[in-house]
Amino acid sequence: MKALAEIQVIPIGVGVSVRKEVKRAHELIRASGLKAQLHAYGTNVEGDLETILSTIKQVHETLHTEGTPRLSTNVKIGTRTDKEARLEEKLFDSGSS
């Protein structure tokens, strides 16, 4: 099943700057094969729902292994049965879909 999602990974306990951990999370998302668009407070992704969920798991496992003691992740997931959802349509379509 295709899905769109917004993923916001919040590292906790690594200090004031979390740039390194956020960059690492985004690298893992990109490496998953998901179509990804980074924005100021997270990453929008498009792809198979199973891949999205397993990628979130991989981000948590990897960042913990690399020393991040706590992670809080906010996820919004959207799926449709009437048509294939695409990031471009959500971001740039002026229609009312």
Image (spheres, helix red, strand yellow):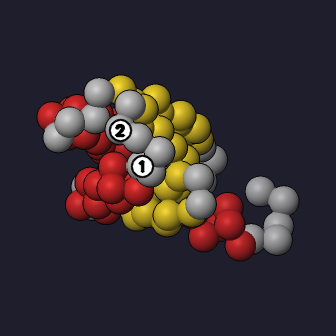
Give me the residue at 41% from left, 56% from top.
19
User: Quadrant of the rendered structure where residue 92 is?
Assistant: bottom right
Crowdedness near tag 1: few (<14), some (14–19) or many (≥20) residues, C-alpha within 10 Å: some
Give me the residue at 17% from left, 40% from top.
66
**What mark, if any, has residue 5 been given in the picture?**
none
Any part of residue 54 in sight: no
**Of residues 74 and 91, which is closer to you in this image?**
74
Specify whether 81 is left or right of 71.
Answer: right
User: Quadrant of the rendered structure where residue 96 is?
Assistant: bottom right
Crowdedness near tag 2: few (<14), some (14–19) or many (≥20) residues, C-alpha within 10 Å: few
Task: Describe the element under mark 2 as helix, strand or loop.
Answer: loop
Give me the residue at 47% from left, 45% from top.
16
**Of residues 80 and 77, which is closer to you in this image?**
77
User: Quadrant of the rendered structure where residue 67 is?
Assistant: top left
Picture quarter with the N terminus: top left
Cα gap from disc 1 to disc 2, whole angstroms: 7 Å
Q: Are marks 1 and 2 in contact (CB under 8 Å)?
A: yes
Instruction: Name the residue tied to disc 2.
Output: 14
- In the rendered image of this protein, does residue 94 appear above or below residue 96? below
Residue 94, horizontal then vertical, whole percent = 82, 71
**Which three-letter amino acid code belongs to the residue tagged 2?**
Val
Any part of residue 80 in sight: yes
Instruction: Name the residue tied to disc 1.
Output: 18
**Of residues 33 and 79, which is closer to you in this image?**
33
Specify whether 63 is left or right of 74.
Answer: left
Task: Describe the element under mark 1 as helix, strand or loop.
Answer: loop
Give me the residue at 67% from left, 61% from top.
90
Specify whether 39 is left or right of 18.
Answer: right
**Which three-letter amino acid code belongs to the residue tagged 1?**
Val
